Amino acid sequence: MKNIQGIMVIGIMCFLLSFGISVQIKSIKNDSTVIAKENAENELRDQVLELSENYNKKYDELEEKQNKLDKLRGDASNNSVLSESWSNDLSKINNYLGLTDVKGKGLIIEIETGDLLLVINALNNAGAEAISINDKRIIFNSEILNDGDVVQLDGIMLEKPYTIKAIGGSTLYGAITMPESYIDKLKKADFKVNIQQKDDIIIKKYEGIYNFNFAKNIEN
């Protein structure tokens, strides 16, 4: 009887021990699952943070490069505008100095003889933008020597008849053909004078050399 009771007690104790071990194992498994889950969440969170930081860094780099590109484009545009402006200014200066070939409407005057300086002055006063005699360009400091039938332009002897080309507005014709003008007097004196109005007159550039004997640059 005692043996049976002992066996029962031992059996109950084994059952209780087994149950306790089972609960403990389940508890350990649950704890391990929770820990593993937390570790996985932490790892994913770290990865998200790392990706976010890399994205922000790349975005800032992209924005910086875009700003540099915009600045370069702006500088290129400004330089282009300045270059075009300088080119236009230089072209105007060269035209004024007679350093380029020019084309435009104006007059072609053929004169057998006479005081060419008076004709040139009348054309200049009427607003001529370019003038030549026998295809030699007249500039702001050109020197015309007229002694009878002998005419020199900047030291070069000119042969007659003289062909004067002038580019300018419609006022040119009226200025040199008005009553009592020098051309009108030549015609009345039966000198040969022929005047043509053209839309495509070409005047060649000045072929000489600019010399400044007295004017000098002022250095800063």
Image (cartoon, rainbow, N blue to C red):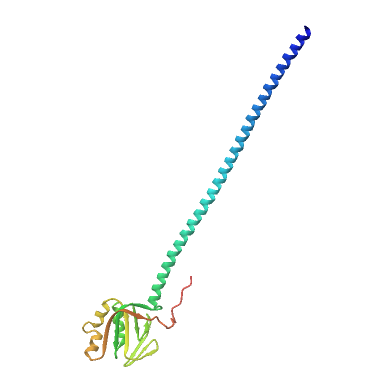
Taking the spot 56% from the left edge, 47% from the top edge, the residue there is 57
Q: Indicate the position of residue 64 as horizontal and vertical percent values.
A: 52, 52
For the residue pair 41 and 166, the one nearer the viewer reads as 41
Residue occupying the far bottom of the picture = 149
- Toward which corner of the image does residue 20 lie, by quadrant? top right
Taking the spot 24% from the left edge, 83% from the top edge, the residue there is 177
Q: Indicate the position of residue 110 as horizontal and vertical percent values.
A: 29, 87
Determine whether, in the image, residue 176 is placed left or right of residue 96.
Answer: left
- Toward which corner of the image does residue 180 lie, by quadrant? bottom left
Determine whether, in the image, residue 182 is placed left or right of residue 57.
Answer: left
Instruction: Decide: is 195 above or below 33.
Output: below
- Toward which corner of the image does residue 91 lie, by quadrant? bottom left
Query: The N terminus is located in which quarter?
Result: top right
Instruction: Decide: is 106 above or below 80.
Output: below
Instruction: Decide: is 29 above or below 171.
Output: above
Q: Indicate the position of residue 185 as horizontal and vertical percent values.
A: 23, 87
Residue occupying the far right of the picture = 3
Determine whether, in the image, residue 10 is placed left or right of residue 177.
Answer: right
Q: Indicate the position of residue 150 as horizontal and vertical percent values.
A: 34, 92
The mark total stands at 0
Determine whether, in the image, residue 160 is placed left or right of residue 82.
Answer: left
Taking the spot 66% from the left edge, 27% from the top edge, the residue there is 29
For the residue pair 124 and 199, the one nearer the viewer reads as 199
Taking the spot 68% from the left edge, 23% from the top edge, the residue there is 24
